[in-house]
Image (cartoon, grey):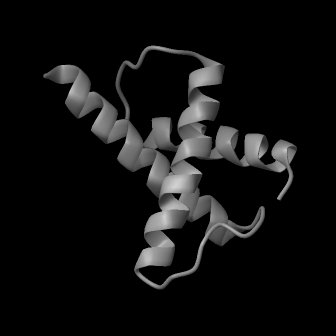
Amino acid sequence: MGIISWIVLGLVAGLLAKLLVPGRDPGGLIVTILIGVVGAVVGGFIASLIGLGSVTGFNLYSILVAVGGAVLLLVGYRFVKSR
């Protein structure tokens, strides 16, 4: 996957994660993209650890893995920020 694909996947994953975990979060579009891209990496790493594969391209499975990772990051961020 190229850098543009990662950014688009990150944007989609970050937006879906924010929709799934509603609430106030600081940051705009750039933070949403960063949460999504890092979420894709985290989700791919976790998926590969448990034997489900990783993020391989712009397809439904990769979006689901990326959104799952982004949701984990968003919940973790809120947990750390609330303390």
Of 40 and 25, nearer the camera is 40
Task: Answer with left or right where residue 25 lies relative to residue 8.
Answer: left
Q: Quadrant of the C terminus?
A: top left
Q: Quadrant of the N terminus?
A: bottom right
Across the whole image, how many numbered discs are drawn on residues?
0
* Quadrant assignment, res 20: top left
Of 13 and 48, nearer the camera is 48
The spot of residue 46 in percent (x, y) is 43, 67
- The outermost residue toward the bottom is 51
* Quadrant assignment, res 61: bottom right
Q: Residue at x 49, y 43 (%)?
A: 17
Above or below, 18 against 82 in this view is below
Q: Residue at x 72, y 70 (%)?
A: 56
Task: Answer with left or right where residue 18 lies relative to residue 34.
Answer: left
Q: Residue at x 63, y 59 (%)?
A: 63
The spot of residue 55 in percent (x, y) is 65, 66
The spot of residue 3 in percent (x, y) is 83, 45
Task: Answer with left or right where residue 13 lies relative to residue 2.
Answer: left
Of 45 and 15, nearer the camera is 45
Of 1 and 13, nearer the camera is 1
The spot of residue 65 in percent (x, y) is 54, 63
Q: Residue at x 62, y 43 (%)?
A: 37
